[in-house]
Amino acid sequence: MENSENVSEKKEEVVEEVVRPENTRWFTLRVYSGQEQKVKDHIQSELEIAGLKDKVFRIMIPSETVIEMKNGKKKEKTRSFLPGYMIIEMVDDKLVQHVVANTPGVVNFVGPKNTPQPLRPDEVDRMLGRMHEKKTSETYDVPFKVGDPIRVTDGPFTDFTGFIDEINYEKSKLKVMVSIFGRSTPVELDFLQVKLEQ
């Protein structure tokens, strides 16, 4: 009895796994910058209309999640690290290429004389690895730079003003020079404890 259950579970796993044809390749598309998501949606709908949806497996916008600091508050935001480009895993087929290339928002395939040039496996691995790496590590889009005037908004130095001396992105800390009893003193503060002084 137990063996038959295990066999049926294995069959379900095999059914869910998508088998890709041998001529499946990754390609890079040049698209209108800032409209990557809209272009991706257009491509998917054009493939659906043409009955070619099963010839394209993944369309990916190379993006990363960054944590933006605004008025001392963290805000997660997704942004493209290659604006104006996306990668597509599809069957290397003239009809599929034609439908994708003629989709609104697509400028062209990246390759010599605008002919689709498949990406090498190491290029794909590097691109997908970078996307995964960016998702697992926090990246800050910090509005501060060395020399900026700031005001402390939290902690024992609240309302003190000073200048940024160093920025430590790994620890999300700033070294700020504040005036205490007439002397310039270095103070280490979190990104969230300060705001830019206008």
Image: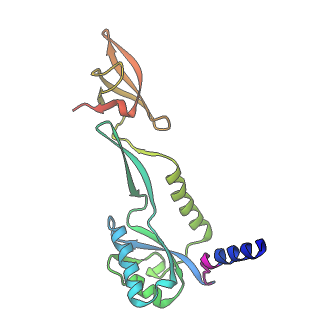
Provide the major secondary structure of the magenta segment: loop
Provide residue 187's location: percent of width, then percent of height.
41, 21
Q: Is residue 58 magenta?
A: no
**Residue at the location (30% across, 27% down)?**
153
Q: Is residue 198 found left or right of 74 in the rendered image?
A: left
**Residue at the location (34% across, 19% down)?**
157
Provide residue 123's location: percent of width, then percent of height.
57, 66
Nearer to the camera, 143 or 17: 17
Q: Is residue 162 found left or right of 133 in the rendered image?
A: left
Q: Is residue 24 found left or right of 116 in the rendered image?
A: right
Nearer to the camera, 154 or 176: 154
- Tell me the quarter of the image containing the N terminus: bottom right
Colour logic: rainbow
- Tell me the quarter of the image containing the C terminus: top left
Residue 126 shows up from this direction: yes
In the rendered image, the vertical position of residue 78 relative to residue 181, given as above or below: below
The quarter of the displayed image where residue 39 is located: bottom left
**Residue at the location (37% across, 81% down)?**
45
Residue 148 shows up from this direction: no
Provide residue 15's location: percent of width, then percent of height.
62, 79
The residue sitting at the left extreme is 198
The residue sitting at the top extreme is 181
In the rendered image, the vertical position of residue 87 relative to residue 19, given as above or below: above
- Per the rendered image, the range of residues in magenta is 15-21
